Image: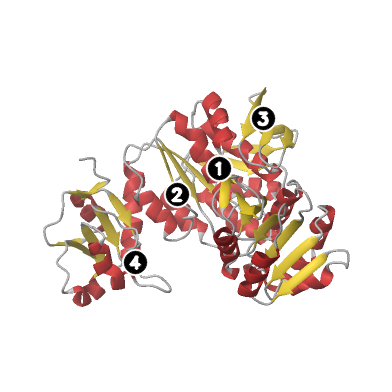
């Protein structure tokens, strides 16, 4: 059997105490009792809202072959007869297993952070590296204090390329995670006004993102966006912590991985990429200049980790959307159809602008309309009113005449938009969802976007429930 971990190795790595007849090994790791599979280990992590120990019996019913639990919770689990590894703190034990995974691995590791585009870039890396070897990458956006160690602990020993996404909304969050991951290449996609409520300005955000340099392996490379204002600051931070290899991407004439030209449509993109002085035409199965820019970082990272570059470039044609990040649905309505662009996963000023540009690039049909369905951008702090008002500019520049809103912060945009724009506003997501479902007509193009806390995924789900998808084309955002 090709085990992910033997029980013996797990006990040694975590310093755990075995109870019962442990299996020889496990085939996977889960922290969710609803998705645990036969032969997997269930780690009963105590989160902010849910304690995994309360769901241990469900994990057993799902086929878990052993569970990892905390010493303090053991008395409450007395009726369970499943083999266990008992530790002091389950999340800390997962972290120790993650460190052991990295120590045993011979993979080339790429880590990605940035205010916008982390998940897209991670998925493009997964795609680009796949033709060159076994790739292990995070599922969804597993980029926080439990998602990163979980992804690392799940990395098979025979992995050849590892891709990790590392996020943050406070200082000192990236530092401990990147020291677990120890990447050979670290990418910062861009610096933008995300989580501004926790920071004084963009430079503070840049400083927090720059923590990724501290975990680079000796001789590793930082890949920085040459087109952003914070480039010099990031370059200096990298040099301060001893990073000797710094490469750049973007449209700047001095960029090492240069986007020489871009041709986009509503469905896809073509770029002309300059690497090592040679220009290559690359097709990307997704729209958006922001995607094309991040593709340059992907191609640069692929080059640095020794991938087959011809295959890497060709693989980008197969890029598909991440749910909630630009995924397109063609929905049947009456005798026609409407186009739904699902950007409901999250939002900040930079990603809002990118999503508005995607909507602008997608033409309605017949008497259809371009409709921006927008909700609050959260964690903007004292900047909230300003950044919501400032969406007026991109909306007007894109020629979007229908804007449907919900959320308390979106009152600022509602009040700032001129009378030439048809503005509809509701206090709640539920009210807006009901309005959207009953107000769309054939030919419409809707782009739905908000911070995750607004629950705009419900609007997307309501549309799909009410209007049958008869063709899905998925695009990355």
| Disc 4 to disc 3, C-alpha distance | 44 Å
Depicted 458 relative to depicted 239: above or below: below
The residue singled out by tag 2 in the image is 138
Q: Earlier in the sequence, mark 1 or mark 2?
A: 2
Q: Is residue 201 toward the left or the right of residue 62 in the image?
A: right
Q: Which residue is mark 1?
A: 320
Residue 85 placement (x, y as % from top left): 21, 61
Give the numbered dot on residue 273: 3
Q: Viewer-proximal residue, 475 or 24?
A: 475
Q: Which numbered tag is attached to residue 434?
A: none
- The image shows residue 385, relative to residue 3, as above or below, that is below
Residue at 80%, 56% (x, y): give it: 400
Q: Is residue 80 left or right of residue 107?
A: left
Which is in the foreground here, disc 1 or disc 2?
Answer: 1
Location of residue 396 (image quadrant): bottom right
Residue at which label 4 appears: 45
């Amino acid at each position: 059997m090709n085990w992910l971990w033997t029980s013996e190795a797990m006990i040694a790595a975590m310093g755990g105490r075995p109870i019962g007849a442990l299996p020889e090994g496990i085939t996977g790791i889960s922290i969710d009792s609803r998705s645990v599979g036969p032969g997997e280990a269930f780690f009963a992590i105590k989160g902010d809202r849910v304690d995994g120990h309360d769901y241990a019996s469900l994990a057993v019913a799902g086929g878990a072959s052993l569970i990892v639990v905390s010493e303090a919770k053991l008395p409450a689990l007395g009726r369970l007869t499943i083999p266990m590894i008992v530790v002091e703190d389950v999340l800390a034990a997962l972290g120790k297993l993650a460190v052991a995974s990295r120590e045993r691995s011979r993979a080339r590791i790429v880590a990605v952070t940035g205010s916008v585009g982390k998940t897209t870039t991670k998925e493009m890396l997964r795609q680009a590296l796949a033709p060159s070897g076994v790739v292990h990458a995070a599922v969804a956006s597993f980029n926080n204090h439990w998602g990163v160690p979980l992804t690392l602990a799940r990395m098979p020993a025979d992995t050849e390329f590892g891709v990790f996404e590392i996020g943050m909304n406070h200082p000192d969050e990236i530092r401990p995670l990147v020291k677990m991951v120890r990447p050979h290449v670290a990418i910062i996609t861009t610096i933008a006004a995300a989580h501004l409520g926790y920071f004084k300005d963009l430079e503070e955000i840049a400083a927090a993102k720059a923590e990724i340099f501290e975990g680079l392996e000796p001789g590793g490379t930082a890949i920085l966006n040459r087109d952003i204002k914070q480039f010099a600051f990031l370059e200096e931070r990298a040099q301060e912590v001893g990073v000797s290899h710094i490469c750049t991407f973007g449209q700047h004439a001095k960029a090492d991985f240069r986007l020489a030209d871009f041709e986009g449509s509503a469905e896809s993109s073509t770029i002309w990429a300059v690497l090592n002085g040679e220009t290559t035409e690359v097709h990307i199965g997704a729209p958006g200049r922001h995607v094309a820019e991040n593709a340059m970082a992907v191609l640069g990272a692929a080059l640095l980790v020794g991938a087959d570059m011809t295959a890497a470039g060709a693989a980008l044609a197969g890029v598909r959307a991440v749910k909630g990040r630009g995924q397109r649905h063609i929905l049947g309505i009456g005798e026609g159809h409407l186009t739904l662009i699902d950007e409901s996963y999250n939002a900040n000023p930079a990603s809002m602008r990118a999503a508005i540009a995607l909507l602008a690039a997608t033409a309605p049909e017949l008497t259809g309309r371009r409709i921006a369905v927008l909700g609050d951008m959260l964690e903007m702090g004292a900047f909230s009113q300003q950044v919501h008002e400032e969406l007026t500019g991109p909306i007007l520049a894109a020629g979007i005449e229908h804007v449907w809103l919900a959320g308390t912060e979106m009152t600022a945009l509602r009040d700032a938009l001129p009378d030439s724009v048809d503005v509809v506003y509701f206090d709640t997501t539920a009210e807006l969802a009901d309005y959207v479902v009953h107000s769309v007509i054939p030919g419409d193009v809707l782009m739905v976007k908000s911070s995750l806390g607004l629950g705009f995924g419900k609007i997307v789900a309501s549309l799909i429930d009410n209007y049958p998808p008869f063709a899905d084309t998925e695009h990355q955002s």
